[in-house]
Amino acid sequence: MNSKAARKDPHFQRVTIIGVGLIGGSLALDLKEKGIAEEIVGVGRSRENLDLALSRRIVDRAVSDPVEGVKDAELVVLATPVRAIIPTARKILPALKPGAYLTDVGSVKAPIVKEMEKAGVIYFVGGHPLAGSEKGGAGSARSGLFAGNRVILTPTKKTDSRAIRVVQEVWEMIGAQVFNLDPKEHDQILAAVSHLPHAVSASLVQAVFRLFPGEEIRRTGAGSLRDLSRVSASPPELWRDILSLNREPMLAILAEFRECFTELETYIKEDKPEEIFEFFSQAKRYRDAL
Amino acid sequence: MNSKAARKDPHFQRVTIIGVGLIGGSLALDLKEKGIAEEIVGVGRSRENLDLALSRRIVDRAVSDPVEGVKDAELVVLATPVRAIIPTARKILPALKPGAYLTDVGSVKAPIVKEMEKAGVIYFVGGHPLAGSEKGGAGSARSGLFAGNRVILTPTKKTDSRAIRVVQEVWEMIGAQVFNLDPKEHDQILAAVSHLPHAVSASLVQAVFRLFPGEEIRRTGAGSLRDLSRVSASPPELWRDILSLNREPMLAILAEFRECFTELETYIKEDKPEEIFEFFSQAKRYRDAL
């Protein structure tokens, strides 16, 4: 018998998912479909959403109280909006079955991981599936959402090694590509590739429409503005929460952006076409390598 | 006989196109295909590109000297890179056949229109087809490029009314949707919907890669950065020329952007989640209405 055959895939009698939306609901469907969980308990504040989750057979049982919901669960997934993860974790920690694994799907990691380490929780593994962040409730959940998509895990030196392995295997069994990052590094990189672009897009849209509130913009077809403003259609609650929680990395990347923007502005102001050319050439080289 | 039947569509014995690239070459193909021009003369500096234009039957005759090229032409189209339009116009004006119509396809309009009015040219109609701005030479030209796309014309009070009608009809005959703007208004609006987004995209790419020069960005899949950086793949020469030529409107919209960006930055710095929410909500309302 080789080691691969000997390896036992994770299997749980009960998994509790707190927050049955696009991410939590889709994860629930996959866990059942792949036979990873026997029973899924869904926790949420909206009775309507829980009833939908039940009728779609996304969850087997639905409760509104997270403390009641995590009872006897072997794996608990925090899939609430990101601002609710820390307060919810504080509530459920004392009620967790000893040895239960805990993970989350929040878009910001360092403050959450820090909170868990402060509480001495070694079975927690921070996670962030990069698979759509729109809200949508249980109605938007679908199986296979994570197949082929990336999931970042943010274990630390203090994290239990079995917990790391189990959470990684769960994601891999449903088809995700898992890789690890330090929680702070995660937040800095996500600030750069996701949070900054959203901040820049919103600022761009604001600037254009404050200067041209009429029909002029639409009449032109809106050109590249359309491309750059697409992400501004995403839910403002999400960005309020992410930017508030990821404050320090955001301020660092915003400062870097301001510096680059000012550099280009100065070249235009001082009429330096060759410097403008170099600025755009370098940006093109970076983009082409992406 | 009603007025529609009486109206005579434009028809030219000779049209000269200066600059046989994507825009100039595609226009040449359409003019021949729709029977608007009997003979197309192509003017360009690259012999290789002109030979390609000849072999693809985009032009009937090719010359390198613009003064020679415009001889006896009834319509002349300036389709060079935008920085070359004014110098080229200066050269050809004395050689134009009396009464010949002149138009251009430059992405910036006020400086060009101003130059023509200074020279007393009343048969010039500024034009800007919004149909792709990548360079590409005669190899990228194709018929039908303008069908269904917008073309902005920028006539003024001094422009000959017949010239306005003829240039508009030419574009409409090849399927474009034509509308008029004041040249300065054109430059301000294009600064907002096109030039600013390119400046912001390049600054974003620069900021992200200066802070993360390694593989980190690519490993995450690059998220929304990918969306917002797409336009940064376009030719840097183009943006050097446009931003240099459209300096004043650019500085105005860059200042407006800076103000909006600073507003959001301040909300994050001062930890004001409800103001962040309002900022993103307003941006979403603008974007959803686009």
Image (cartoon, coloured by chain):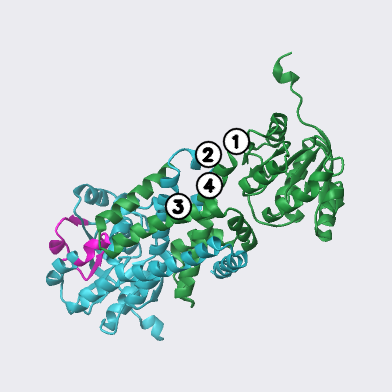
Chain colours: A green, B cyan
- Image-based side of A61 in relation to B279, left or right: right
Asked if marks 2 and 1 fall on the same chain, the answer is: no
A89 or A115: which is nearer to us? A115
* Residue placed under numbered mark 2 in the picture: B219
SS at mark 3 in the image: helix
Asked if marks 3 and 1 fall on the same chain, the answer is: no
B116 or B29: which is nearer to us? B116
Q: Earlier in the sequence, mark 3 or mark 2?
A: 2
Q: Residue at coordinates 55% horizontally, 61% vertically from top-left?
A: B268
- Image-based side of A88 in relation to B151, left or right: right
Q: Quadrant of residue A264?
A: bottom left
Cα separation, mark 3 vs mark 1, equals 24 Å
* Residue placed under numbered mark 4 in the picture: A188
Q: Chain of mark 4?
A: A
Label 4 crowding class (10 Å Cα cut-off): few <14, some 14-19, many 20+? many
Q: Chain of mark 2?
A: B
Amino acid, disc 1 = Phe
* Residue placed under numbered mark 1 in the picture: A179
Q: Quadrant of residue A1?
A: top right
Amino acid, disc 3 = Ser
- The answer to whether residue B89 is magenta is no
Number of numbered discs: 4
SS at mark 1 in the image: strand
- Image-based side of B156 in relation to B178, left or right: left
Q: Earlier in the sequence, mark 4 or mark 1?
A: 1
Q: Decide: marks 4, 2 in contact (CB < 8 A)?
A: no
Number of the label disc, if any, that sits on residue B229:
3
Establish if A43 lies above or below A224: above
Residue B237 in view of the camera: no
Cα separation, mark 3 vs mark 2, equals 16 Å
